[in-house]
Image (cartoon, coloured by chain):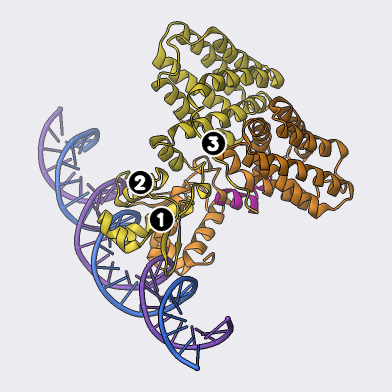
Chain colours: A orange, B yellow, C blue, D purple
Amino acid sequence: MTSSLHHRAIENLGTRIVSGDLPAGHLMLAEQLEEELQVSRSVIREAVRVLQSLGLVETTKRVGIRVLPASRWNPFDPQVIRWRLAGNARGAQLRSLAELRAAVEPVAAELAAQNAPAPLRLELVDVAYAMREAGNSGDVPRFLELDIHFHSLLLSGSGNEMFANLMGQVAETLTGRTVHGLMPDHPHEAPLQWHVDVAEAISRGDSAAAREASGRIMRRTISQMSDSWTEQPRVFIPVRR
Amino acid sequence: MTSSLHHRAIENLGTRIVSGDLPAGHLMLAEQLEEELQVSRSVIREAVRVLQSLGLVETTKRVGIRVLPASRWNPFDPQVIRWRLAGNARGAQLRSLAELRAAVEPVAAELAAQNAPAPLRLELVDVAYAMREAGNSGDVPRFLELDIHFHSLLLSGSGNEMFANLMGQVAETLTGRTVHGLMPDHPHEAPLQWHVDVAEAISRGDSAAAREASGRIMRRTISQMSDSWTEQPRVFIPVRR
DNA sequence: TGACACCGATGTGTGCAGACATCAAAACTC
DNA sequence: GAGTTTTGATGTCTGCACACATCGGTGTCA
């Protein structure tokens, strides 16, 4: 039911708010939204309730439905991330995700070396070898698929459900990087070997080596992507006291 | 409006699902929930829509409202985190948050050293000094307050809105740690100095030193808390393909 | 005359009740 | 077993009553 009226209403309002089309402070009335989207009150009310839980709007009696500033949005919500990736904040969103990934993956590798179940360790090694092959043979789509699979296994193997939940976002950044031509036709030798190093370190339970090798991959990734970020302004969320 | 019927319905169902009282696969009907919570259909529907957006339930025509497994929940949603902290998964949730923090803060410190606005850097140094004083004089409540403020400034100063959003969760872990008597009456000297080191490194833009000092704090924090975690089983979220 | 506290009118979200539409699971027919 | 019909749940729409924050008017006091 991805195109129910409810879903479409959320999508419509969510994209417009995140894109800045409906700026912070903008006031709307439920009745006016019914008219605009040509749906009934119940649809609007249920959609507004969801947007409220995402921190995109707040409702006040006698006032209406007010759009909240970006600092109140839940930046980890998959829908908010999707809307930002689809809009003009795409660059900033990709940078945020890449930095988050850079922070998390080395620790995830360390934890996976300590805790991952045996079958997952074996699969990780297999995938790392397959990545090296696909990379050397220039099979870009297969490489992307394996790359996503590798990092998903790593996050899953950490045994931390918050890390594991980043699988989807990581897939998004890797895909975005490939689609936007930020990847060389032939991935470089060194990063391919580092992936193998991570997998083998996890496989033998060497958490320090896993962390170190993963850190190398992340530093390389960041330095490659940072060129296309420099123009994106950073946003500083004020400290709430 | 924190005690509207809508809010109470979400709270009721959310806590019961997260606590395992309503297990994955459990089926409910809207009509039955109306009866049980003694509210009208619109209240139930709006609450279910919100829970649906959090990944806690799914609705199917002709079937009803089905509780989803924990692997489908959004582990970054503040409400989900709060429900887990309030229930029997408290230990696992605190560990997840601490590991996330351990991963993020060193990178946040690095970014803050590169990007934070000047006033924030100055405030960070002030707070670090005040922390050292409060720590040495054994003023626990003030120390906790300053500790939260310090780490909030650090995350905010990174200029990454996802990092900044973790302020609330970090406050929760620090408070939880203090309330549960996991903190010594007098904080140790070394960590106090490391906080000052982080602040001064950020202040002078030395990102490597900031990351290093922050990493020391995190390693100490993890090793102190890990004693109370060992009994918590880890959950491995399967890779979705 | 001016400042301030009170109070009632107004408008908008919240909650309720009932109807019909839709659609997928389940039962039935061949 | 394949195709069709029935059924029962969510999806959508609508009219109404209520709660309550805001605003403007009224009255009191200095």
Marks 3 and 2, Cα distance to the nearest angstrom? 26 Å
Q: Residue furthest top?
A: B137
Taking the image as shown, residue A167 lies to the left or right of residue B127, namely right
Residue at horizontal 40 percent and vertical 18 percent from the top: B181
Type of amino acid at the residue the image marks with label 3: Arg
Circle 2 chain: B
Picture layout, residue D7 above or below residue B215: below
Q: Which residue is mark 1?
A: B26
Q: Which residues are magenta?
A: A79-91
The answer to which of marks 3 and 2 sits earlier in the sequence is 2
Taking the image as shown, residue A180 lies to the left or right of residue B11, namely right
Quadrant hosting residue A104? top right
Type of amino acid at the residue the image marks with label 2: Glu
Q: Which residue is mark 2?
A: B11
Q: Nearer the viewer, mark 3 or mark 2?
A: 3
Q: Please, what secondary structure does the residue beneath circle 3 have?
A: loop
